[in-house]
Image: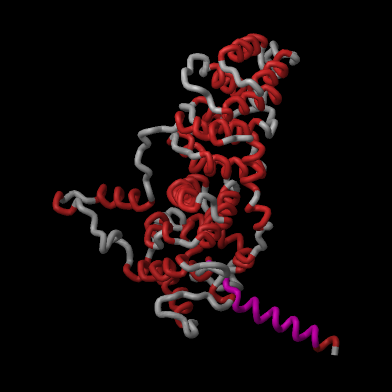
Amino acid sequence: MGKIKKLRTRATKGSASQHSTHLTEDLAGAETDKISSKRIKERYHQEESEIVDSKLTKKILNAARKQQESLEGHGVGIIKPPSSQLTSPQDDSDDEDYPDEQAYNSSDAHFMEELDINEEDAASLQVFMNANPQPRKTLADIIMEKINEKKTDVSTLMPDLENPLPDLDPRIKEVYLDIRTILQSYRSGKLPKAFKVIPHLKNWEDILYITEPDSWSAAAIYQATRIFASNMNQHMAQRFYHLVLLPRMRDDIDYYKRLNFHLFMAIKKALFKPAAFFKGILIPLCEEGTCTLKEAVILGSILAKCTIPVLHASATMLKIAEMKYSGANSIFLRVLITKKYALPFRVLDALVFHFLSFRTEQRELPVLWHQCFLAFAETYRRDISSEQKESLLELLRIKVHEKITPEIRRQLQGAETRDVEMDEPAFNDELFQ
């Protein structure tokens, strides 16, 4: 009987493997037993430079048709992947366990307690917020700009809202309109394979626009971020973060006064590509000057929990230190400072000049600024020069906080400074160019 059970087990596994057809093989038109995974990846890289051609269109439509035929009592136009045939083997990770949601619910509260901010301090942050922010660009704005650039006739300058992408195959539009319906009500499970091919398309922004990302469920945003962070290059991921993930995060916090758990996990997953995360989310948020305390606390708590490469952290600190100040900038700087990186001297000098630039500031500085100054003094007091130390001590006579300033002075006065230039960690100037 034992042997019979083993044979049945093997038969079951063999049957499952026959139905588990890789997505790339459907699109490339190759048989599973003739093409290796290495050749599939090579073909993917070749397809990245091509717009959706007729052969790829045919394969996408075939996959969608199979999904439609497999419907069992579901609404018309809903693509529901019921079996392993409709998903790639990599989809097994779609059902991964989430961290403890209860722990998440209290994470930003704990981080707020660490910052020790009262209502009066929070109000002082408003003084440093940008009163005239630039209008935020959405994915729809980008697509409409592309369409208008192609139009030469004055009479056609107005966008066609009924048919915004006239050059796209109508059958492709129909497939992704169905996927849009799925993503709007998605809660869990596996996603359609036609959606997972988006990162490999040259016109991926146009395809994504059809699915209306601003209407996706929070769970769909998380799954999309996982897929795109893993399969997109840095530039593409940065675009997705900036045009889709960042606006959705801000809107959710503004409306609910907290961040949905799935969006919180999506932001953490976005750090899989740190340069894209900083250039697509954190730096634009700081440059706009409208980051609220709640947004800064939530993002700061994510940064505090995640591991960030030293070069990306250094480039981010340099960028924030040199930009126009807003209260939220101090939260991000403090979080990165407390990670205690071995910073290049160029970054240390930029942080010193950042604090010294407030010598002539007439507005009352928020407590966040003093807390950030204290974190810098505690961590890097031995890495600054004696001249910088004296300048910072002089600054303490001008900008005073009754509880924090004495501790900063004690840290600086008791430290041996660096007066000899030593070898420093390599720093890549191209990270944020």
Question: Which quadrant: the N terminus?
Answer: bottom right
Q: At 80% across and 83% down in the image, what residue appears?
A: 6
Answer left or right for 47 relative to 368.
left
Which coloring applies here?
Answer: secondary structure
Q: Residue 17 lies in magenta, yes or no? A: yes
Relative depth, front residue between 62 and 220: 220
Query: What segment is highlighted magenta in the picture?
Result: 5-23
Relative depth, front residue between 74 and 111: 111
Q: Does any portion of residue 134 appear in the rendered image? A: yes
Counting from the top left corner in percent of width and height, residue 175 is at 40, 70
Answer left or right for 95 relative to 28.
right
Q: At 57% across and 70% down in the image, what residue appears?
A: 189
Up the image or down, 118 lies above or below 363; here it is: below
Up the image or down, 84 lies above or below 388; here it is: below
Q: Main secondary structure of the magenta part?
A: helix
Relative depth, front residue between 190 and 87: 190
Counting from the top left corner in percent of width and height, residue 330 is at 56, 30
Counting from the top left corner in percent of width and height, residue 413 is at 72, 13
Relative depth, front residue between 172 and 328: 328
Residue, far left: 155
Counting from the top left corner in percent of width and height, residue 358 is at 52, 18
